[in-house]
Image (tube, rainbow, N blue to C red):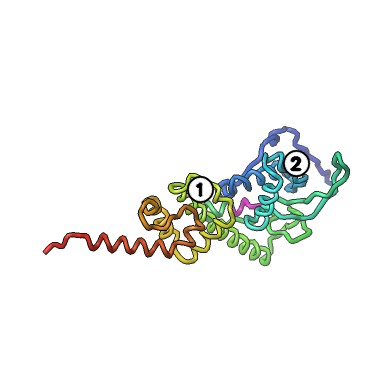
């Protein structure tokens, strides 16, 4: 009978650090990124995280409501984690239920996002597993699972691309509003940009926002300092801009 070996790595070279994918650093806001990093630190190599929201918020140095919003965002919008159930844990005040979250394997998505055009490698084990399964259960990636993973990648990348465009346009408001950073995490302001992007290109909207530095100082021009104001007043702003443009054309010297 062949002897089985049980090898344990006690070198300690994997202790006390957490690896974060670049795609998380570049696409998550400061609050979501902090919660994501904290959850990854707690989960370790097992990939699961559970702790009370009070302890989570203290570890992230933010309010409980802010931490809850980030957890919901990481599940619903960013798709970095998933909720898999609940667990009863002992606390100083007695036993309580806490949610269990699984950190999704996005390393293949991370690689594809930054290495466009490169050959697609095999999906790592555990990516796209069905409810109730655990990472590492897939020994063979079937065509059905491959198609599912491909669709997930496309959806995830599309969400990231849209989020990056919104962030780029919000960042342009720094020239007209010193408090523009708060817009990154305000749903109403982000939705306003998303709706505008359905009507105009990112480049056209960027040009309009850049011109606000000048037009906000002009008499009779609509004052715009937030994405929501831009959405509500863009019609009036365009009328003002065209009117001023005609004035400039009319004042040009006539050369025979």
Between disc 1 and disc 2, the foreground one is 1
The quadrant in which residue 246 appears is bottom left
Would residue 104 be seen by someone viewing this image from the given angle?
no
**Camera-side residue of 188 and 39:** 188
> Which x, y percent locates residue 105?
67, 52
- Residue at the farthest left position: 256
SS state under label 2: helix
**Camera-side residue of 42 and 7:** 42
**Camera-side residue of 256 and 90:** 256
- Residue at the farthest right position: 94
Looking at the image, which residue is at 79% across and 55% down?
Answer: 85
Task: Using the numbered discs, state the Cα–Cα distance from disc 1 to disc 2 in whole angstroms.
Answer: 30 Å
Side of 56 where 77 appears, left or right: left
The residue beneath circle 2 is 55
SS state under label 1: helix
Magenta-tinted stretch: 104-109
Residue 180 circle label: 1
Q: Earlier in the sequence, mark 1 or mark 2?
A: 2
The quadrant in which residue 163 appears is bottom right
């Amino acid at each position: 009978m062949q002897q089985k070996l049980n090898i344990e790595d006690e070198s300690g070279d994997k202790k006390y650090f957490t690896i974060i994918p670049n795609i998380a650093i570049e696409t998550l806001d400061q609050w979501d990124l902090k919660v994501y990093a904290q959850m990854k630190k707690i989960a370790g190599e097992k990939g699961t995280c559970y702790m009370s929201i009070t302890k989570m918020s203290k570890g992230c140095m933010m309010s409980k409501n802010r931490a809850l919003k980030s957890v919901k965002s990481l599940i619903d919008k960013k798709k970095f984690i998933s909720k898999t159930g609940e667990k009863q844990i002992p606390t100083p005040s007695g036993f309580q239920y806490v949610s269990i979250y699984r950190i999704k394997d996005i390393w293949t998505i991370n690689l594809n996002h930054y290495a466009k055009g490169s050959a697609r490698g095999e999906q790592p084990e555990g990516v796209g597993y069905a409810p109730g399964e655990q990472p590492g259960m897939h020994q063979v990636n079937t065509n059905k699972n491959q198609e599912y993973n491909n669709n997930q990648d496309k959806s995830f990348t599309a969400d990231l691309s849209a989020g990056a465009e919104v962030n780029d346009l919000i960042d342009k408001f720094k020239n007209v509003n010193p408090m523009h950073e708060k817009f990154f995490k305000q749903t109403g302001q982000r939705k306003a940009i998303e709706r505008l992007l359905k009507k105009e290109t990112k480049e056209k909207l960027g040009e309009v926002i850049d011109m606000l530095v000048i037009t906000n100082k002009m008499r009779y021009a609509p004052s715009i300092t937030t994405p929501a104001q831009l959405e509500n007043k863009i019609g009036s702003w365009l009328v003002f801009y065209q009117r001023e443009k005609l004035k400039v054309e009319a004042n040009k010297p006539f050369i025979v």
